[in-house]
Image: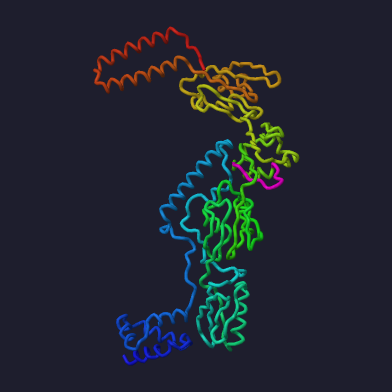
Amino acid sequence: MNLTKRLLLSLALALPVTTAAQSISQSQIEQFKSMPRAQQEALARQYGVDLDSIAGSVGQQNQRPKNVNVVEPVDAITDQEREQAQSQSREDKENNDEQGHRSGGLKPFGYDLFAGSPTTFAPVTEIPIPNDYTLGPGDVLRVQLWGKENQQLELPVSRDGTISFPQSGPQTVAGLTFDQARQQIKKRVSEQYIGVQASVTLGELRSMRVFVLGEARNAGSYTVSSLSTITNALYVSGGIKRTGSLRKIQHKRDGKLVGELDLYDLLLAGDTSDDNRLQPGDVIFIPPVGDRVGIDGEVYRPALYELNSGTNLQELVNLAGGLTPQAYPQLVRIERNNDDFLRIIAEANLTTPKGKKAKVKPGDRIEVASISDITGQYVEVKGAATRPGRYAWVPGMRVSSVIRSLDNDLLREADKRYAAIVRTDPETDTVSVINLRLRQALGNPGGENDILLQEQDQFLIFADEGKVSAKSRDQNDAMAERSALNNGTGNGEHKGVNSGTSNRANSVSRGESKDRHF
């Protein structure tokens, strides 16, 4: 207790002095703070010491910038603001649907980057600080001394841009890059401390206020981290409206244009070289969207694209991800307005230098045609085959090259005796039908009946009428039997019906000729 009284007496005597912050050691303050609250108040009343003054002296001695929330927490958003955001989202969706209807279903490219509601807009701060990071008031430098003297210092940058280095006075660091400040501190330590080395890192980072204006979803001023870039600020504002430009985002400082960001470089090439780091008071201005053209058809990303000056047809195709394998580059249709404001159609050939360099104009709608269906080098099998369809044709191909087995390659009801080949003369377009003895052709491959096939021949396999009737009869009998079982019909009655039906079917079958049909 005597130690405590001496401690409190020293505090009481030191506080009124203007150099109180230097007279009270940190260890004395910590000893006093470790006491119970009731004991602190009792001793303070006994010696006439104000506890707030003691706490204030501690705060002055270790003054550091207060933490500032980079983004307002979601819980702090009022119901009115939430309703306003939802209303804005619905309005944007309606505008997008209307715009997509006008443009034939095409949507503007790139705006999905800001779709959804991210949980935080704060940039990642647990990353190495770049050497060109500019220090300012609110940043905290951490200096570790080792060697003859070991000490850990945290030096906040004050409002006048200086840090208070122990036993050596203030040092100006505001406006310096982190690398420059680190080199100066190391040099100062080596000159004033013998046998001591220093390691300098950045602790807490300052926050700053920037402005996002123009066609932003929620224009206004925002508090962001000092590591924030243009894209971070765009996320803070909720993104860009469909009426805003993605290609000419302006970065201004003190009323002057510092640079422009083209988000197409980020979206299509992953290029962030123009995504500049922001400074306090910077303005990000989003101008209205520029000229757009639409591209559809056989490209990988059909959409509406914002143009830069002088965009040609090949550059637009590259923006759309290139041509698909099904594209027919010799036919590119271009719908555009002429000088009389009438909609006309032009054509371009992307396989020629002239077609690639054709200039596109605002409002154009471009469609890349598809290649046609298979037009050559095939033969087609139709009818009662196990695997009908088109087969690759090669010179010297015969019937036995396509149908190798009567049992495996034909259906059960197929007529295995006769078939037909429909052939079209490519020069005269004359259609002829060639009768084929199928069994003889497969029984003697390469023989007279194994006819040579030509390109685009149609190979018709017929079905035997009798076999088709027997198959249908079997199916009908099976259905009738299942129906009788379900309805509880007697076996005798059911058998009589089936027998009568079967006899009539047999008589009809015997009386008719076994016609072939396709």
Q: Is the residue 417 above or below the residue 19 in the image?
A: above
Residue drawn at x 61%, y 19% as measured from the top left: 422
305 magenta-colored: yes
Q: Nearer the viewer, residue 473 or 227?
A: 227
Residue 15 position by quadrant: bottom left
State the residue at coordinates (25%, 15%). 492
What segment carries the magenta color?
Answer: 303-313
**What's the residue at 37%, 88% (across, down)?**
8
Front residue of 86/347: it is: 86
| Residue placed furthest toward the right | 354
Where residue 110 appears, x then y in whole percent?
58, 48
Q: Quadrant of residue 45?
A: bottom left
Is 51 colored magenta in this rendering? Answer: no
| Position of 274 relative to 26 (above/below) | above
The residue sitting at 59% across, 87% down in the picture is: 192
**Quadrant that contains the N terminus:** bottom left
